[in-house]
Image: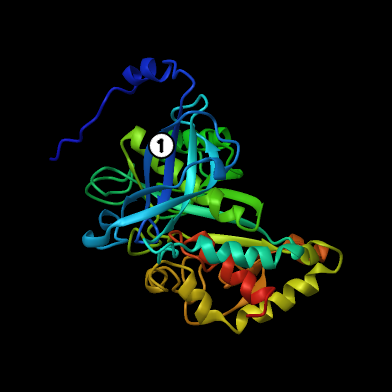
């Protein structure tokens, strides 16, 4: 059995309380070349920045993050959002960055660049998003946390929103993540245990435009860091366990100003019709491998639609697009796109939704 290296976190506390003599530790975060991994490194700033533009542009070795060749490896980090650092606390910050190549063009996995342009063009409609991020907690050996090592837990049924040590595994991790997100300034709005044991969900939103991607990526970074402290691993794989187990998605709730106003249901239905004409394009945008990951999840079983067909319905969790029953009764509100995978890039998801429904592109 492999020995897992651990440290005593209580020892760290006495160092976290040390004065920093007016300096600020800024942890720069960015998306790597896989389109789903997040990287980070830290630098010292002489004062607390008030705006991302106050943070210096930095660089990193792209050949070690699947983003450049070793012969021309420098990539640039352009700060675009600041959050409080829940791990170092004090005046220390997290700095979310765009990645640019040596020629100052966006990196191949820099989906934020075009997303920001699209959101600016659509800002009059005030597009709001809320994403339900599902994930699975694993032991260090890659086995779902809390599952029997030589078997399986009981069938699905008692685990969703469950309570009790025999029904939910890893709540301490979930609670720590929630508090850390609130401290950081992430617009996290809820969490719950999911259908498969060791699977959880947190929700971010509602946020407007480009902020959806910013807040979800930082929430993901915080989740991985919290899991690191607890000696476990978090996976965003959309089908972490084969067989009769639910997969993991990133259901995306979406509305515009027109949808949220009186008679907005008609606007929602018009948007759904537009989405129906671009199903393949959306599927390609909804996971980093252009639908290959979602093929394992969107089977028409386990509360999913088929990846091959577009469908919509009121309160139907087996449809591509769900209109919540309350929205149908009120006559206004939002729609839920249930197709995005858990490892999606939220910039790509929100961009294509706005292109299809608002910009008619």
- Of all residues, the one furthest to the left in this rendering is 1
Q: Residue at x 22, y 61 (%)?
A: 71
Q: Quadrant of residue 18?
A: top left
Residue 89 vs residue 159, the one in the foreground: 89
Give left or right: position of 256 versus 180: right
Q: Residue placed farthest to the bottom in the image?
A: 277
| Residue in front for this viewpoint, 65 or 255 | 65
Residue 146 percent coordinates (x, y): 33, 42
> Residue, x 69% and y 62% (percent of image)?
127
Where does residue 60 sit, x and y in percent of width and height? 33, 49
Residue furthest front in the image: 103
Q: Is residue 292 above or below residue 198?
A: below
In percent of the image, x 45 and y 62: which residue is there?
110
Colouring mode (rainbow / by chain / secondary structure / one colour): rainbow
Residue 159 visible in image: no
Q: What residue sits 59% from the left and 78% below the top?
A: 311
| Rendering quarter of residue 107 | bottom left
């Amino acid at each position: 059995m492999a020995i897992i290296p651990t440290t005593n976190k209580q020892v760290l506390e006495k160092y976290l309380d040390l004065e920093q003599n007016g300096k600020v530790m800024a942890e720069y975060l960015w998306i790597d070349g896989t389109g789903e991994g997040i990287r980070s490194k830290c630098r010292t700033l002489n004062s607390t920045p008030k705006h991302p533009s106050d943070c210096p542009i930095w660089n990193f070795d792209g050949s070690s993050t699947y983003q450049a060749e070793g012969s021309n490896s420098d990539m640039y980090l352009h700060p675009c959002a600041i959050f409080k650092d829940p791990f170092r606390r004090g005046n220390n910050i997290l700095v979310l960055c765009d990645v640019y190549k040596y020629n100052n063009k966006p990196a191949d996995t820099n989906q934020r660049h075009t997303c920001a342009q699209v959101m600016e063009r659509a800002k009059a409609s005030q597009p709001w998003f809320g994403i339900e991020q599902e994930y699975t907690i694993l032991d260090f050996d890659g086995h779902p946390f809390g599952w029997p090592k030589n078997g399986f837990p009981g069938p699905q049924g008692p685990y969703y929103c469950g309570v009790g040590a025999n029904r939910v595994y890893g709540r301490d991790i979930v609670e720590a993540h929630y508090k850390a997100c609130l401290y950081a300034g992430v617009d996290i709005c809820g969490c719950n245990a999911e259908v498969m044991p060791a699977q959880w969900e947190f929700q971010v939103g509602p946020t407007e435009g480009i902020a959806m991607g910013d807040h979800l990526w930082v929430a993901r970074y915080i989740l991985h860091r919290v899991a690191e402290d607890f000696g476990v691993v978090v996976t965003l794989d959309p089908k972490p366990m084969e067989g009769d187990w639910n997969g993991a998605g990133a259901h995306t709730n979406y509305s515009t100003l027109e949808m949220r106003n009186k008679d907005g249901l008609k606007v929602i239905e018009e948007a759904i019709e537009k989405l129906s004409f671009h199903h393949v394009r959306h599927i390609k945008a909804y996971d980093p491998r252009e639908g290959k990951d979602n093929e394992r999840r969107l089977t028409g079983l386990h509360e999913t639609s088929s990846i091959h067909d577009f469908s919509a319905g009121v309160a139907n969790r087996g449809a591509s697009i769900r209109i919540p029953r309350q929205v149908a009764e009120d006559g206004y509100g939002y729609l839920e796109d249930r197709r995005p995978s858990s490892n999606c890039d939220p910039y790509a998801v929100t961009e294509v939704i706005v292109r299809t429904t608002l910009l008619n592109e």
